[in-house]
Image (cartoon, helix red, strand yellow):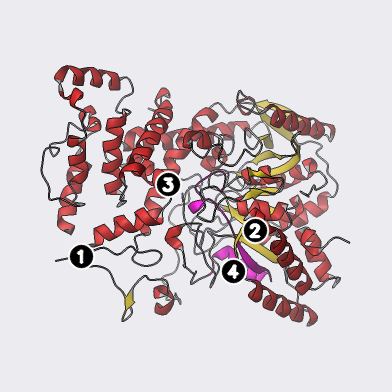
């Protein structure tokens, strides 16, 4: 299961911000069938199956692409937002029921439209700031010092045994 | 005579030092105030009365033996996202119900070392994500001046407790205005220190490059005193700055009466724009006029990138939050929802444990960081952050402090913005630039609206500008008003 996860994530990292992907078309995986349940492929499937019938004609698609091009790369239609929310929820390991996903998709569309105003600025020559107070290379002597006891560390664990955290099976 | 719960922090400290009152009496007074009003205000989410009384007894004994510590026997309230060993630390989230901190945050350790009694945990928006304390799993905090209005957020519990005399003083945290805005809404002083001035060790991380702990108090001097205790370099937080101690309270003592002669106050045109409530504007301008009467000089300045701050802030803060909140996975602490496989367990645990606003921010942050969107959103926001820092740097060439509103409106009604997250985010327009720039700022009460709601003035200082900021705030401070 872990390995499946890794395979699923890798192509996402290499994808470019193509218009197609933001609409849920560009991915080579969108027609791929995956096992049911909360499988890693679910988000991708969701994009394919939730596509409204009207959008499947090439003409509609071209028009929609043109409409979206005006705000580069921003997926703002509710359909694309719904698919994007499910894709991202999967990355964040967060199950969303239909109602919550719908609600967040609606809000996210509006929020992204708002934050897209940053595109007005010419930022070519501007360096990014990660930290307001740049402090670099903070070292301390590598000395043994008391830390939390094992009992303290495990004191809030939902399940622990023999000084270890207990989790559901990872490898079958 | 007023009851000890109504005293300021400095007053309480002085009366304890002169043995006019015992710590036990102070703690009892605060506990009885909590007993009377907390049900209605919902400011505290837990109070450890027995332990507090026991610590008060010990503090009185220590004082009888001639011991002195700056806050010996003074009870302080702590926002429920700052770790105090043995106490709950729930962040007002379902996912941390039942969690107890196995260690002290650095600020808690410093307060204890100064003799303070950490008597209760204060309500907040879930994981400090909100501007109204309405996203708390414990329900909203009520504004002490009007039960139909919010207390602000996310440190709404801290601000309401201090304003309504349910605490002598309190700690909050400020990521995008979460100390200053509730202080303005409730009518107390709220101070967000320079990034790196106060250790974040033991503060539950929301957006690590923006978070900072600070005091909510009944007076400017109180803020200085509390800041003196909690500030300083900490080996456990490598972002703390190695700068000389503050001694802010002592510096204020030397100033004595309010005197603003020679102070250049920058007034940014961008902070007085459409959308600013007329009463907030009137009170802000009146305070500025008073300051010039005290000898200050008002200077017009520009902060041209203010209008982009909210967009940049919500991209950066949610991106950092999505990474920070990955740790709540049902393995080491907090809620676990049973499932057959581990991925299902993560997904279900997080679904059941987080509220809607937290989920929304995790989704936005993960989206902003995900492949293909990183350059468009996160990187762009970081570049805008550079521009906002540069705006402030240019402004501080021409002035010592910047003054303006804290929020565009006084406290709004409960539920008014809850269904419209974007509207809620936009209400942070005047506070988030400070966090993006890492500089210091405070809110000091300057009056009340016709409806009786308090309004604070925001004073912004450059990095390490705390002493100037506090001295300036003293000039704006009025006699303290209390909600009935």
Q: Which chain does the numbered disc 3 sit on?
A: B
Tell me the distance, in whole angstroms, between the alpha carbons under discs 3 and 2: 25 Å
User: Do the numbered discs 1 and 3 sit on residues whose CB atoms are within 8 Å?
Assistant: no
Indicate whether B267 appears above or below B97. Answer: above
Tell me the distance, in whole angstroms, between the alpha carbons under discs 2 and 1: 45 Å
Q: Residue at x 52, y 37 (%)?
A: B424
Front-most of residues B106 and B31: B31
Q: Is residue B121 highlighted in magenta? A: yes
Give whichever of discs 2 and 4 has the lower sequence position: 2
Q: Quadrant of the N terminus of chain B?
A: bottom right
User: In the image, which is nearer the foreground, mark 3 or mark 2?
Assistant: 2
Q: How crowded is mark 1: few (under 14 residues within 10 Å), some or many (20 or more)?
A: few
Q: Residues within 10 Å of mark 3 (few under 14, many from 20)?
A: some
Note whether residue A149 is visible: no
- Mark identifier at residue A170: 1
- Mark identifier at residue B109: 4
Note whether residue B323 is visible: yes
Give whichever of discs 3 and 2 has the lower sequence position: 2
- Mark identifier at residue B356: 3
User: Both on one chain, marks 3 and 2?
Assistant: yes
Q: What element carries label 2?
A: helix
Q: Which chain does the numbered disc 4 sit on?
A: B
A29 to the left or right of B410: left
User: Both on one chain, marks 1 and 3?
Assistant: no
Residue B389 image position (x, y, % from top left): 53, 36
User: Both on one chain, marks 2 and 4?
Assistant: yes
Q: Is mark 3 on a helix, strand or loop?
A: helix
Q: Residues within 10 Å of mark 4 (few under 14, many from 20)?
A: some
Q: Mark 2 points at which residue?
A: B39
Image: magenta residue range: B104-133
């Amino acid at each position: 299961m872990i390995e499946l996860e890794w395979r699923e994530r890798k192509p996402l990292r290499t994808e470019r911000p193509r218009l197609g992907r933001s609409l849920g078309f560009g991915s080579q995986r969108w027609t791929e069938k995956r096992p049911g349940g909360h499988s890693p492929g679910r988000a991708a499937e969701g994009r394919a199956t939730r596509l409204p019938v009207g959008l499947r004609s090439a003409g509609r698609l071209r028009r929609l692409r043109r409409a979206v091009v005006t705000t580069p790369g921003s997926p703002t239609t509710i359909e694309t937002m719904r698919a994007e929310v499910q894709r991202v929820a999967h990355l964040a390991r967060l199950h969303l029921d239909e109602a919550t996903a719908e609600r967040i998709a609606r809000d996210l569309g509006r929020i992204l439209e708002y934050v897209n105003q940053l595109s007005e600025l010419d930022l070519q020559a501007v360096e990014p700031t990660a930290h307001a107070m740049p402090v670099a290379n903070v070292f301390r002597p590598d000395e043994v010092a008391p830390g939390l006891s094992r009992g303290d560390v495990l004191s809030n664990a939902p399940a622990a045994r023999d000084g270890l955290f207990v989790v559901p099976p990872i490898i079958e | 005579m007023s009851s000890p719960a109504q005293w300021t922090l400095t007053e309480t400290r002085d009366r304890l030092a002169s043995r006019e009152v015992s710590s036990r009496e102070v703690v009892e007074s605060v506990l009885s105030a909590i007993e009377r009003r907390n049900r209605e205000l919902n400011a505290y989410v837990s109070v450890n009365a027995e332990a507090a009384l026991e610590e008060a007894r010990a503090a009185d004994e220590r004082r009888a033996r001639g011991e002195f510590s700056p806050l010996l026997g003074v009870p302080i309230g702590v926002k429920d996202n700052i770790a105090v060993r043995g106490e709950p630390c729930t962040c007002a989230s379902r996912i941390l119900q039942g969690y107890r901190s196995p260690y002290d945050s650095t600020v808690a350790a410093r307060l204890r070392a100064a003799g303070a009694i950490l008597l209760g945990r204060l309500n907040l928006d879930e994981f400090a994500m909100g501007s109204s304390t309405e996203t708390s799993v414990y329900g909203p905090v009520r504004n002490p001046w009007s039960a139909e209005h919010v207390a602000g957020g996310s440190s709404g519990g801290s601000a309401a407790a201090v304003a309504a005399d349910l605490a002598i003083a309190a700690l909050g945290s400020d990521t995008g205005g979460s100390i200053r805005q509730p202080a303005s809404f409730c009518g107390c002083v709220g101070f967000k220190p320079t990034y790196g001035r106060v250790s974040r060790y033991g503060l539950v991380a929301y957006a690590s490059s923006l978070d900072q702990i600070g005091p909510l108090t009944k007076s400017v001097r109180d803020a200085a005193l509390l800041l003196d205790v909690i500030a300083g370099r900490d080996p456990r937080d490598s972002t703390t700055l190695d700068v000389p101690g503050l001694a802010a309270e002592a510096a204020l003592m030397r100033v004595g009466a309010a005197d603003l002669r020679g102070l250049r106050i920058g007034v940014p045109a961008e902070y007085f724009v459409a959308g600013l409530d007329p009463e907030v504007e009137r009170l802000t301008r009146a305070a500025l006029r008073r300051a010039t009467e005290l000898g200050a000089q008002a200077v017009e300045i520009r902060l041209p990138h203010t209008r982009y701050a909210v967009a940049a802030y919500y991209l950066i803060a949610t991106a950092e939050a999505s990474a920070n909140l990955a740790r709540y996975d049902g393995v080491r602490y907090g809620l676990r929802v049973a499932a057959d496989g581990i991925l299902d367990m993560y997904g279900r645990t997080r679904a059941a444990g987080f509220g809607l606003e937290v989920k929304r921010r995790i989704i936005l942050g993960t989206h902003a960081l995900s492949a293909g969107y990183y350059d468009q959103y996160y990187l762009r926001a970081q570049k805008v952050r550079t521009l906002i820092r540069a705006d402030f740097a240019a402004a501080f060439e021409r002035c010592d402090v910047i003054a303006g509103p804290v929020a565009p409106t006084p406290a709004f009604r409960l539920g008014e913005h809850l269904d419209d997250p974007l509207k809620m985010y936009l209400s942070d327009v005047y506070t988030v630039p400070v966090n993006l720039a890492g500089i210091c700022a405070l809110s000091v009460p300057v009056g009340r609206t016709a409806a009786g709601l308090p309004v604070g003035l925001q004073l912004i200082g450059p990095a390490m500008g705390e002493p100037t900021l506090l001295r300036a705030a003293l000039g704006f401070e009025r006699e303290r008003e209390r909600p009935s």
